[in-house]
Amino acid sequence: MDIKEMDIRNQIKALAALNAMTITSLTKEMSKRTGKNYTYSSITNKLKRESLSLKEAYLIADILGYDLEFIRKS
């Protein structure tokens, strides 16, 4: 199964693991960068409900060393 076929929760977990990061360390960095209190539970619940905001998705991608990009379909 390739990463595009995974649900969002597993995609984030896989990308974090590829970057030697846990969800807990990811949430700590999110809190540090935003001043908001992100916890393991808050992020995993958002991922389960698929209610992650676009701003949070950009933040997570940046922390993990990725860019999110919208590409027009051909």
Image (cartoon, rainbow, N blue to C red):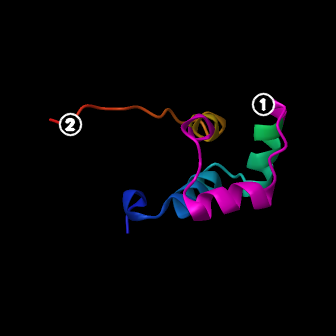
What residue appears at the point 36 percent right and 32 percent down from the top-left corner? 70
Looking at the rendering, in which quadrant would you find the C terminus? top left
Q: Is residue 25 left or right of residue 9?
A: right
The image's mark for residue 73 is: 2
Give the total number of marks visible in the rendering: 2
Q: Measured from the top left, where is residue 58 in percent x and y?
A: 57, 35
- Which numbered disc flags the more N-terminal residue, 1 or 2? 1
> Does the magenta segment cover residue 22?
no
Q: Is residue 22 visible?
A: no
Magenta part of the protein: which range? 32-57
Q: Is residue 37 above or below residue 47?
A: above
Q: Is residue 6 above or below residue 58?
A: below
> Does the magenta segment cover residue 49?
yes
Q: Which residue is mark 1?
A: 34
What residue appears at the point 38 percent right and 57 percent down from the top-left corner? 4
Residue 50: quarter of image: bottom right
- Looking at the picture, which amino acid does disc 1 mark? Thr
Q: Measured from the top left, where is residue 45 in percent x and y?
A: 68, 62
Q: Measured from the top left, where is residue 57 in percent x and y?
A: 57, 41
Q: Is residue 63 left or right of residue 2?
A: right
Q: Is residue 18 left or right of residue 26?
A: left
Q: Is residue 18 visible?
A: yes
Q: Is residue 44 left or right of residue 72?
A: right
Real-space Cα distance between discs 1 and 2? 33 Å
